[in-house]
Amino acid sequence: MQILGNIFNAVIFVSAIGSIFTVISLFVNHVLRCNLPLWFSLCGMIFFVVPFLSPDVFLISPEIQDWINGFRIASFLWACGCSVLIVHDVIRLMLAKRAIRRYQICNNERLNSIYTKCAAATTLKNVPTLYCGTLDNPICVTGVICSVIIMNERIIEQLTDNELSAVFFHELTHVKRKHALLERLYDYVCIINWMNPLSWIAKRNFSLHCETDCDFHTIKILRGKITETAYASAIIRLLEYSTVRAAKPGNGIGALDFLLTKRRIKRITARTSKIKDGLTAFMLAVLLVLMLVFSMRFSRELFYPYPAYNTGIEYSAGYNE
C-alpha cells in the first residue's frame, strides 16, 4: 500500500500539471484562435504521464510517511478504476478484431485503382489493406501495428475521382504520421488519469489536432494536383453522404461535429503566414518552458523532502527561542 500510495501521489501531481497545460492550450486554441501544432498537443499528453521534478526531490520517498494512510481508499479506488478500464479496452479491441475478420477486401476496380496510385505517392512501406464494411463512418483507419482502412463502399463510390484521391490521401497520411498510435497511447494516458475529466477533454482536442495535422500534410502532398477549396469540398461532400441516411433518419450530424468540421474547413482554406506561424511557435515554446519551470517548482512542495526549499531561517529562529 505504501508503494501504491506513492504512485497515486505521483498520478495526482501529473494530472494537476496536465490539467493546467490543457486549460492553457484550450485558451490559446479556442479563445486566442491560434492554430496549435501537433507537437504542442503531444507535450500535453507527456505532462499527463511524466512528472517533471526538481533535481533535489525524490518521486518515491525512502521513508514511511503517515500521510500515505489517508490515500489508502483513494488509491485503491484509482487502481480499481484503471483495472476496469483496461479490461474494457481489451474486450473492445477483441471485438473490433473480430468485426474486421467479417469484412471483405475491396474488389471494386475503380476504388482499388485510385487507392493504389495514392498509396504509391505517399511512399508508405507497408500499405494498409482496403476493406469494405458497414460502418457509420464513411472511412477510417484502424490498427496500430498492422493498420487497415475500412470504408463504407456505398458512400465512398459516390465521390468523384478527385474527391476519392483527397479522401484516400487523407487516410494514408494518418497512417504515415502514426496518428492511430498516438491516439492509442492517449487512451492509456486517460486510463491512468481516469478520475480527471480534463484528461478526456485533452484527448478529444488531441484528436482534432491529429485531423488538422493530417489536413496540412495531405494538402502539401496534393499541392498542384488539387486545390485547398476542392479538398475542403471533398470533406463536406463526404460528411453530407455519411449523415443523410434514409434508414436512420435520426443519425444526423451533431452540433459539436458541425463546429469541429467548420473549424477544419476554415484552417484548410485560410491563408498561411510564415511570420505568424513563427511567432505562434515561439509563444508556444515559451509557454512550454514556463510549464516545465512551474512543474519543477511545484514538485518541491509535494515530494520528499517536504518542502525541498532552504528552511535554514525558520530552523534558526526556532533554535534561538
Image: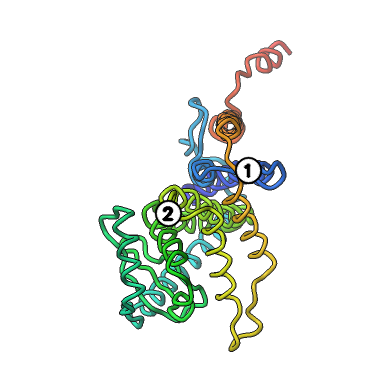
The tag earlier along the polypeptide, 1 or 2, is 1
Q: Is residue 296 visible?
A: no
Q: Evaluate if marks 1 and 2 touch, with contact meaning CB atoms under 8 Å apart.
A: no
Q: What's the mark number on residue 225?
A: 2
Q: Residue furthest top?
A: 320
Front residue (pair 30, 237): 237
Front residue (pair 223, 106): 223
Percent across and percent down for residue 111 are 36, 73
Secondary structure of residue under mark 1: helix
| Label 2 crowd bin: few (<14), some (14–19), many (20+), radius 10 Å | few
Q: Which of the 4 quarters of the picture holds residue 100?
A: bottom left
- The residue positioned 67% from the left and 70% from the top of the image is 254
Mark 1 lies on residue: 25
- The residue positioned 35% from the left and 67% from the top of the image is 114
Percent across and percent down for residue 76 are 54, 59
Q: Is residue 252 visible?
A: yes
Front residue (pair 259, 21): 259
How many circles with numbers are drawn on the protein?
2
Percent across and percent down for residue 51 are 50, 39
Q: Which of the 4 quarters of the picture holds residue 208?
A: bottom right
Q: Is residue 159 above or below residue 275?
A: below
Q: Which of the 4 quarters of the picture holds residue 147?
A: bottom left
- The residue positioned 52% from the left and 77% from the top of the image is 136
**Residue type (three-letter) at the residue carrying disc 2:** Lys
**Residue type (three-letter) at the residue carrying disc 1:** Ser
Secondary structure of residue under mark 2: loop
